[in-house]
Amino acid sequence: MGKKVLIIGGVAAGPKAACRIKRLLADAEVTMVDQDNLISYGGCGIPYYVSGDVSDEKELRSTSYHMLRDKKYFEKAKGVTTLTSTRALSINRGEKTVTVENLKNGEKQDLPYDVLLLATGSRPFTLPIPGNDADGVFTVSDIHKAVEIKERIARGKVEKAVVIGGGAIGIEMAEAFADLWGVETAIVEFMDQLLPRIVSRTLSTILEKHLRDNNVDVFLGEAAEEIVTEDGKVVGVRTAKRNLEADIVIMAVGVRPRSELAREAGLHVSDGGAIVVNERLQTSDPDIYGAGDCIEIPHLVSGRKFFAPFGSMANKQGRVAADNMAGQVSIFKGGVGSFILKAFEMSIGSTGLSLETALAEGFDAEVSLTSPADRAHFYPTQSIMCLEMIFDRKTRRVLGFQGVGSTSDGLLARLDAAAVALCGNAVIDDFSNMEMAYSPPFSSAIDPINAAAYVADNLCEGRMRQITMDSFYAFMADRSLEPDWLVLDVRHVKQATPLVEKFGESLWISLPYDEIRERYNELPTDKTLIIFCNAGTRSFEIQVFLDAMGLTNNLVLPGGYNVIKRMGADWLPES
Amino acid sequence: MGKKVLIIGGVAAGPKAACRIKRLLADAEVTMVDQDNLISYGGCGIPYYVSGDVSDEKELRSTSYHMLRDKKYFEKAKGVTTLTSTRALSINRGEKTVTVENLKNGEKQDLPYDVLLLATGSRPFTLPIPGNDADGVFTVSDIHKAVEIKERIARGKVEKAVVIGGGAIGIEMAEAFADLWGVETAIVEFMDQLLPRIVSRTLSTILEKHLRDNNVDVFLGEAAEEIVTEDGKVVGVRTAKRNLEADIVIMAVGVRPRSELAREAGLHVSDGGAIVVNERLQTSDPDIYGAGDCIEIPHLVSGRKFFAPFGSMANKQGRVAADNMAGQVSIFKGGVGSFILKAFEMSIGSTGLSLETALAEGFDAEVSLTSPADRAHFYPTQSIMCLEMIFDRKTRRVLGFQGVGSTSDGLLARLDAAAVALCGNAVIDDFSNMEMAYSPPFSSAIDPINAAAYVADNLCEGRMRQITMDSFYAFMADRSLEPDWLVLDVRHVKQATPLVEKFGESLWISLPYDEIRERYNELPTDKTLIIFCNAGTRSFEIQVFLDAMGLTNNLVLPGGYNVIKRMGADWLPES
């Protein structure tokens, strides 16, 4: 008789582990249990099923060769005994059994194991507000709910949608509603920006503007206080500031690890509710493993444990757990929290720490903000990316990398390369010389990631002094905040003139980049010059030059007009 | 007086270094010399200028903010004295001067230096064959030639083109001719594949088929023996096998470092003709630096010095050299030879070593060939990539990574991530758990790079036994080579049937993947089963299962039908 392997959870880590174990130990008796009747699905695909990009939910449950990953598939193709609609009730560690209940007929049985994998995943958090259980309130958690949401839209029952939560899933769902179905859609986010903590306000503002430009309303800094209902059905969402009408409400306010089974069995569970595992993915009971959304993993930049509920991580962990359960040592070192999101014609993503989280972790963190072209600037399909590289001033270690770009995979390329480097404790200089494959249709001779590192290097060495985009926006809203600031626009005269005319030379002056060496003595010396160009690169050169001329009272606005145009601002002249 | 900095070469590394030095040492007296009157251009953009994607050659010489990078620009915007149409004749190391000649008036002068940078670049190699200097024969080396080529096409003077050389530039030029101008175009390559040594025959055959499908003829294993001329003008190219008519011939047979100046000054130059530098990019004279196409750099996988003539490397080296010349220690560790190329609707690229070069370097090298979707297989824009991961069986170190994909940046993302890992001496397991940002529009839960590593792991551990695509093609051409091979097609019956019907069950049998556990005993035991599916993943599972049943006489065809379909084969049934 082969090794008895029991797996609780049949969505991502569980099936991956089950199949891998059968490939390593052909005679293992592998049993996979899930409380749902639908298993092994791509949950991250739900927004694309709702939008209609994916026409049939079965595609989310099928292999690339179009076989449905159902109970029969796991049994016939994989040799894995599969109990669906079966809930694990308790782990009996002494006897090494798990008591499960068939949800269809209520029958219970004890399943024996030599090794057990907990791949119990996560559950969506539900806000404890009135109306949260009304008809028409959904979380984005499983295929059944996805089908019901899509059916309501397809039947023409949804004209107005409110998404509570401005994280990745909320934004993907908002796009699904607004883009292909034309549903009037609003996002309500409690924090004062989208993707809070994950990206800066600068990048989130770019995303926010893009959502608004695509007919998604965004209300920030507003808690949903009540789901308004009539006859038990959703009719709206109330915040402190407004009432929003809605036929459907999506609650996308994060997920929590499902760890009750582990906790009740006396396994070590973190304060945050995640199952604690070692790098072989063993829980505090060495015969019981954990993988996927129910565990926490080491963050390879901060060193702290974190919760990384991504299908991609779950699959990797499933394989590592399977190796170890099959008796072959395999290590899962941790992760850096990479993420990427499509929102209409934009991609936004992150790896490692944002400036906010890096500062909170105690790093001497600073950010390089750049706005380069994503491929050769002369190549017709080029578009501007806005990138932030977070680094530690003392150690020069790169701590994180975030950006927005087009929906090409150009942002992906930089995030993935950055993630590998972050895992290897890379410093700024490693990014400066990072070898990125180059030809004009794909990149530029100085790749955006190299350029971001150049700026970080200049900041670190004190060669570049900058203000933040936040402080510039605050200043433009209230100039009394910085009464001695004067914007020096070094772009072409044609670009600068509309701003000079709008604001007058007490706020905005023009002196083109290539005339500065001859005309710098025309500049006022009693003002702090805020040097302004399209991307920040010319501004830095001007700073270096002015410094050398003894005119050191100047600061660079990093990212420049490229970033501001994408953020939007009520003070920008019509173009 | 500031430091005297002299730079020979004004295309990529030279201008980068000149500007960087001025930013580090504002009072440095920087002089840049180039024998051409056009400088600081994106030479890699020439094929896109010829094709018409880039309408004006000035775009290749302009900044992203549309300033022309000419002599005046470098002087006014950058503060760099710029001598164009000026050739450096000799370095006088004792006096620390360089003798230069103004090519317009023949005047000579000695320019003094404290530090000197040789950024003399490379020159295209010209085949020593009759007619190589005829009117209509071009190398792709500078803007002047690019302009002349495009003018000839635009004037309707070019109906037939022959490109000699099946490397990156040759292929890019062939696309430029054939795609937008409709010129009848042929590539002649001396070696028996395109991109020899850089990618495998499998990948090069996919590229070759794609070129043919886009009306580019490809003649392999044929040396151009003569440029046929009439009245001094090109009329064709003769190989041992054929005469090809041509109004224009592009000779793209590689480049050689320009190192005469260095050699004549007694600096250390390699056998291959490249200037030898240390990791601070100093030549054998510590006051003389080298950067760009004229130097050789350490290969971070093989450890050997290599020649990496890429604009992207030149820029990085220019910055490192500038730092050191300005007195700030900076290191250029080397590279891994990353490259990417667009050919019509395909991208092809490489980083690190190919199987062929890895074997030649003495590694115990093996390859994992996979054909995954480049994003979630249910996402509408997904397409298949064909990937090869090269690894060392003994050390499990990953040595290289090559692939073909669509023209999205999806291949770029995997190449760039792989390149960072290669520079960090990554082993297979690092690639297995490499964190790639995931959401369905950009990637799959098991990223292609992770999947490639999984296969490499299975090969390394002896869990997977494979044949090569080359040996399968040889077998299909001549079955007597492997008289006991029998193809076991585990795809859907509908997919397998055309092949079973075409070849008969003595060559090709069908047994679907999900029926194998019930029906394996129907399989013949006197044959070596070549297990065949779309991508190789099901084949491997079948292998593991059959092995466990004691039927170990079987081998996997990696990559499967996905690869074969893209390679093309005369034995494939019409689909």
Image: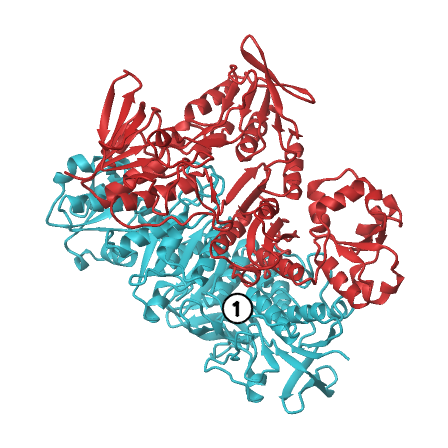
Chain colours: A red, B cyan
Q: How many marks?
A: 1
Q: What percent of the width, then of the height, locates residue A484? A: 85, 51
Query: Which quarter of the image is occupied by the N terminus of chain A?
Result: top left
Residue at 53% x, 50% y is A415
Identify the amino acid type marked 1.
Ile
Does A363 appear above or below A229? below
Between B398 and A342, the residue placed more toward the observer is: B398
Q: What percent of the width, then of the height, locates residue B459? A: 27, 54
Q: Residue furthest left?
A: B526
Residue at 57% x, 16% y is A130
Between A138 and A478, the residue placed more toward the observer is: A478
Query: Which quarter of the image is occupied by the C terminus of chain A?
Result: top right
Image quadrant assignment for residue A90: top left
Q: Is residue B4 left or right of residue B449?
A: right
Is any atom of residue A102 visible in this view?
A: yes
Does B252 appear above or below A439? below
Does A27 appear above or below B64? above
Q: What percent of the width, then of the height, locates residue B305? A: 45, 74
Q: Is residue A395 left or right of residue B574?
A: right
- Judge the density around disc 1: few (<14), some (14-19), many (≥20) Cα neighbours within 10 Å: many
**Pointer 1 indicates a residue of which chain?**
B
Give the residue number, with chain letter if any, for mark 1.
Answer: B250
Is any atom of residue B385 visible in this view?
A: no
Q: Is residue A520 left or right of residue B374?
A: right
Q: What percent of the width, then of the height, locates residue B341? A: 49, 58
Image quadrant assignment for residue B82: bottom right
Between B415 and A253, the residue placed more toward the observer is: A253
Does A161 appear above or below B70? above
Q: Is residue A423 left or right of residue B515?
A: right
